[in-house]
Amino acid sequence: MEPIEKTTRPGPGAAERLGLSAADRLGLVERLGRWSSGRGALYLLLAGRLRTMIDDGELPPGALLPPDRTLAAALAVGRSTVVAAYDLLAGEGRIVRRQGSGTRVAGPASGTPRPTTDAPAFLHLLEPRDGVIMLACAAPDAPPAELAEAYARILPDLAGISGDIGYHPTGHPALRRAIADRYRSRGLPTTPDQILVTTGGQQALTLLARTLIRPGDRVLVQAPTYFGALEAFRSEGAVLGTTQAGGVSLRYGITAFHNPTGVVTPEAERHRMAWSAAASGVPLIDDEVLTDLGFPGHPSPPPMATHAPDVITIGSLSKVVWGGLRVGWVRASPALIAQLARMRTVMDLGGNVPAQLAAAALLPHLDALAARSAAQRQERHDHLRSELGRMLPSWEADPVPGGQTLWVRMPHGDGQSFAQVALRHGVAVLPGSGLDPTGGSRDRLRLHFLASAEDLTTAARRLAEAWREYEAKPHRETFPPAMAI
């Protein structure tokens, strides 16, 4: 932690002192606002404000940022504050620092529209685009018949509600009981007061990050891993690491049909992870959102909390049922659940009651639904691998035992720049670098295999066409992505 420095709001003309363009002088420094108010070291607060400006588009891709000495002088802070903030953002892939060309916001050169696959938010991947096959965001593309049937079954219960205003910050009691019952059926004793219902798994991660992380805390994650977890942790000022070291405040892992690699961590290693966290007193989040997505013959492993009861478990119905059913949850100690519920009360007072009642009616049938979809997912997994092998034999796409995605390795090149070419050919793919907090995985792509066989064949053909174009032209090194999904 660096020493506290006196911070003053820059006076008139501060932007001009940075030697910026006329457009930049419209308020770059002033737009930082009260960046130094808040908890934590100044470099974390400065990085947090710059991160927000980058992600919101206030600082466009390719924009040249002030030299560290210049910005430090304008903000009346030590140069080390700016250097540390820039280094943190560079490690996240939001900026690039090159000797001789300065510090720039990640993305293509200034003046070039930001490619869709680079966007700092992922709204573009949640809405279909005409003519584009979306292999980037993985989730079922239609609700199953069981979901409509569950809504039909709960209509009498909904019509009979009285004396209930519908605000349940911890979740509707019926759904909390159903989730607790499901954990007990998997060998993990659980009571309803250990369950918090959330609006999907992403809200569960956001609530946990806000509750458990303080600016500067070190969070241990896998590389690669789920982008939404990385963003939730970074938003709270966490410093992400991938190797065990002292001072870790939180651990996060996906050990069942991992996103994006699809692998399952061996049970002995899961046991070691759980007991290591328990022995050190460091909270461990076990992300089980994909745990029900094994292929036939590959059952879900038991929750890691069966090895150490204090392991925090998150789950969701978005991957096994449908993304439009915004129901997720946290399983944790009653004390932590109470903390999370207080924070959720401030956020949205509680979730959609009809959706929660439908989810409660659906949960007893979840295993049957997952088993029915498993064979279809494996067929599509096999089909995409076959088509890639036929049309792109130089690419590597190892088989997986479940999940929704292939972790593809290109023989050379950069996934970020190739994704831009692929998009022009009508396929949206996910570059691996945005999922890797170490800055690695640049030769990787994440492709989901949930589309129809016809669409997967078309996608593979378009990717092959894009690859021929990509190989035929020299490509400048691109700036790393600000974020990917």
Image (cartoon, helix red, strand yellow):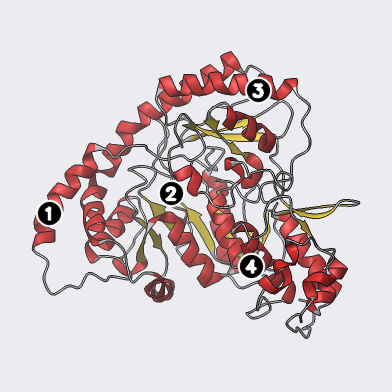
Image spot of residue 232 (x, y percent): 55, 60
Name the residue at 46% across, 39% down: 138
Q: Which mark is residue 467?
A: 3
Check if mark 3's residue and mark 4's residue have beta carbons within 8 Å. Answer: no
Q: Left or right? Give the position of 91 relative to 235.
A: right
The local crowd at label 1, few if under 14, some if 14 to 19, many if 20 or more residues have their Cα within 10 Å, is few
Mark 3 vs mark 2, foreground winner is 3
Alpha carbon of mark 3 to alpha carbon of mark 2: how far?
33 Å
Residue 220 visible: yes
Name the residue at 62% across, 34% down: 419
Mark 2 vs mark 4, foreground winner is 4
Image spot of residue 275 (x, y percent): 55, 59
Image spot of residue 266 (x, y percent): 54, 42
Q: In the rendered image, which residue does mark 4 sit on?
A: 237
Q: Which mark is residue 155?
A: 1
Name the residue at 73% across, 76% down: 42
Q: Nearer the viewer, residue 105 or 374?
A: 105
Q: In the rendered image, which residue does mark 2 sit on?
A: 289
